[in-house]
Amino acid sequence: MKKVRVTFYPTGEAVEAERGKTLLEIAKEAGIFIASICGGDGICGRCRVIIKGGEVEAAPTTLLTREEVQRGYTLACQTKVLGDVEVLIPPESRAEGAQILIDEDAQRFRALYAASEEEALFRHDPLVKKLYLELPPPSLQDNLADQERLYREIRRYIPALPMQTGLKVLQSLPKLLRASGWKVTVTLGRRGGTVELIQVEPGDRAGQNFGLAVDVGTSTVVAHLVDLSTSRTIDAEACYNSQMPFGEEVTRRIIYAEREGLKPLNEAIVGDINNLISALISRNKAELSDVTALCCAGNTTMLHFLLGLDPTRIRKSPYIPAATAPPPVRAAEVGIKINPRGLLYTMPSIGSWVGGDTTAGILATGLYQTRRLTMFIDIGTNGEIVLGNRDWLLTCSTSAGPAFEGSGVKCGMKASRGAIERVEISPDGYLRYKTIGDAKPKGLCGSGLIDAVAGLFAAGYIDRSGQLLPDSSPRVRERDGQLEFVLVPAGRTETGKEIVLTQRDIENLLRAKAAIFAGAKILLKSMGLDFQDIEQLLIAGGFGNYLDREKAIMIGLIPDIPLERVRFVGNTSIIGAKMALLSEEAYARAYEISKSVTYYDLITYPYYYDEFISAKFLPHTDLSLFPTVTKRLGLEARV
């Protein structure tokens, strides 16, 4: 196959590739990230690049304007390379990939705080622990074998559970015990109903024992380095999920795995976790061999990708995963680089579409033990909702789409430096905004998108169906047959391009919020309850912490209940994983939770589509559900 040379700017990186491949394929193989939501199917329009020179063949698309085509824009996934080419990746198409988040970005995802005022307290008893032992030397009167002698001493400190030891550990034991003067540190890991003797070290190293709690998110991967001997969280780090070029939501990634194989997806997430571990270990001057365990929480599909399990049947009726509660495995088996004999634990999932991150959320917030009727909503690409209290728990999953993550939006971006996160529109039309890091604006993230739509609605620039009104503001204009609202002029942005909110963007947000609200309403209805019965509403996820409660209510994302009942609980996925890592009791409770929660399949509800359509209006077709919004905006007069 003839080779061609492709040079990517602004980095100037040049790579050789096979003639006839698409620019997106070539970039992916070279480790050069270009934003792509649809995984290369040519339906999202996010992988825009500019051809500076060379021979290419581009498929026709309606996702580029005539003006953009004239300026050399093309879709990387629909453009085949026929000769040497020079390509500019514009700022809006540069995906962050596995780059470590720093400064403000990392702080948004770290969640170094408790999840809830009702957070459960568990005894400190880590899944993997170190014990310093001083063994009596053997004698004619005490002639136990070396392994049994060690077991006898261990059982002075832990329950008399069955124990097992690997052959390599056993082979080294006689020499090590005698060379250390019978003073050793043992590392013990809980594996189901047994305790594994993971390693034996000379001397007292009981204080050198570290673990990692990891939130394996669809968009973001977060890791906390924990001192297992003291329960202290030492440090935290985050990165964007490198699987994003294969599709920004899990269904697309499953389809990619069906077509191209599971390996690239597995390698991407394992690579992200290893990068985070490396950063944390280097920064804190720890030894990799002293990291003996990690506990991962994520949705069911993400945990399948991590463990290399076939996820393809998750998206096909009757929606059966390979496993919902995989046993602990050697981390090295999946390629995670900690102590070679260290263990990988995963939080058990509730079902195909409600994963271990939801189990972790229920554990972290103490929802399973509260007397108050509670609704828990994890807002993200997949919106998980839990309803109940200590007596019963019901859950469902809604496909909200990537709008809340800043994707599927023309000028959308993830919540990173330069993203508009706050928007205020005054009654006289004056617009103010705030960006993350107070940097020049680059795009619009999820919280900014909600603020913007709420502001447009309150100012009367869009109607209750979300339609922009042509003559309502000088900022409303028509471009390529579609109305849009200019948020920031080109001269004030980092990219030199206007930041706009299009009619299609508004429709994407309304679909996303409708999916979540309809799911919440159906759960309540199935139990003969309504929104006013909710005693506390818990909003989870890194996104939730930056959500304006009043504006979320104004657009109908969350119910119109007293604001004091609405609480943000942060990244409960990682908090729950950390609780399980630090306590065998918490880990066991997570398993009990995963088996006790009832999954409600929204598809089986006969009027789901009707509820969804009703929720697509602002704030809803039924204004009686939003009395404070109706009164504040005078909606009855605007009908």
Image (tube, rainbow, N blue to C red):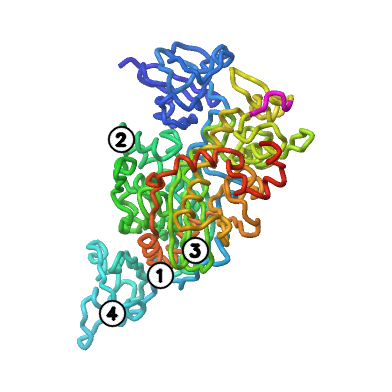
- Mark 4 surroundings within 10 Å by alpha-carbon count, few (fewer than 14), some (14 through 19), many (20 or more): some
Q: CA distance from mark 1 to mark 4?
A: 24 Å
Q: Residue at x 38, y 51 (%)?
A: 337
From the viewer's side, name the closer residue of 249 and 32: 249
Q: Mark 4 — residue? A: 152
Nearer-the-camera pick, 619 or 165: 619
Callout 4, which amino acid? Answer: Arg
Q: From the viewer's perspective, is residue 436 above or below residue 368? A: above
On-image quarter of the C terminus: top right
Of circles 4 and 2, the one toward us is 2
Please identify the quadrant where the N terminus is shown: top left
Question: Callout 1: helix, strand or loop?
Answer: helix
- Mark closest to the chain's N terminus, 1 or 2: 2
Q: Is residue 225 above or below residue 153?
A: above
Residue 472 covered by magenta stretch: yes
> What label does residue 258 carry, if any?
2
Instruction: Name which of mark 2 and mark 3 comes first in the sequence.
Output: 2
Give the residue number, with chain letter if any, for mark 3. 367
The amino acid type of the residue labelled 2 equals Glu
Instruction: Residue 586: give x, y in percent of width and height.
Output: 42, 67
Q: Horizontally, is 331 left or right of 441 in the view?
A: left
Answer yes or no: do the residues labelled 1 and 2 have beta carbons within 8 Å? no
State the CA–CA distance, disc 4 to disc 3: 40 Å
Dominant secondary structure of the magenta stretch?
Answer: loop
* In this rendering, the label closer to the viewer, 2 or 3: 3
Viewer-side label of 4, 3: 3
In front: label 1 or label 3: 3
Give the magenta-colored segment's residue range: 468-473
Q: How many marks?
A: 4
Q: Residues within 10 Å of mark 1 (few under 14, many from 20)?
A: some
Dividing the picture into quarters, in which one does residue 324 lie? bottom left
